[in-house]
Amino acid sequence: MKYEENKYKLSCQLSSSWLFLKVQKK
């Protein structure tokens, strides 16, 4: 089962992209 791993990867991608957007808006 790779569900947990996928979930973790997804959340990581999401937070990183969110951070990126936040920085870009400045």
Image (spheres, rainbow, N blue to C red):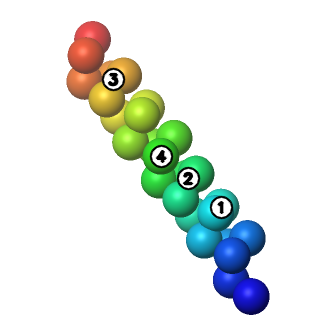
Lower position in the chain sequence, tag 3 or tag 2: 2
Tell me the element at label 1: helix
Q: Position of residue 1 (x, y in %)?
A: 74, 88
Give residue 21's quadrant in the image: top left
Mark pair 3, 2: CA separation: 16 Å
Q: SS class of the residue under badge 4?
A: helix
Image quadrant occupied by the C terminus: top left
**How far from the left and from the top, in percent, is residue 13?**
47, 53
Q: Position of residue 18 (x, y in %)?
A: 42, 34
Kindly identify the amino acid type of the residue bearing the numbered disc 2: Cys
Q: Earlier in the sequence, mark 3 or mark 4?
A: 4
Asked if labels 4 and 2 touch by Cβ distance under 8 angstroms, the answer is yes
Residues at circles 3 and 2 in contact by the CB criterion of under 8 Å: no
Q: Residue at x 33, y 23 (%)?
A: 23
Which three-letter amino acid code belongs to the residue tagged 4?
Leu
Query: SS for tag 3?
Result: helix
Under mark 1, the amino acid is: Tyr
| Labels 1, 3: front one | 1
Q: Disc 3 designates what residue?
A: 23
Residue highlighted by disc 4:
14
Q: CA distance from mark 4 to mark 1?
A: 10 Å
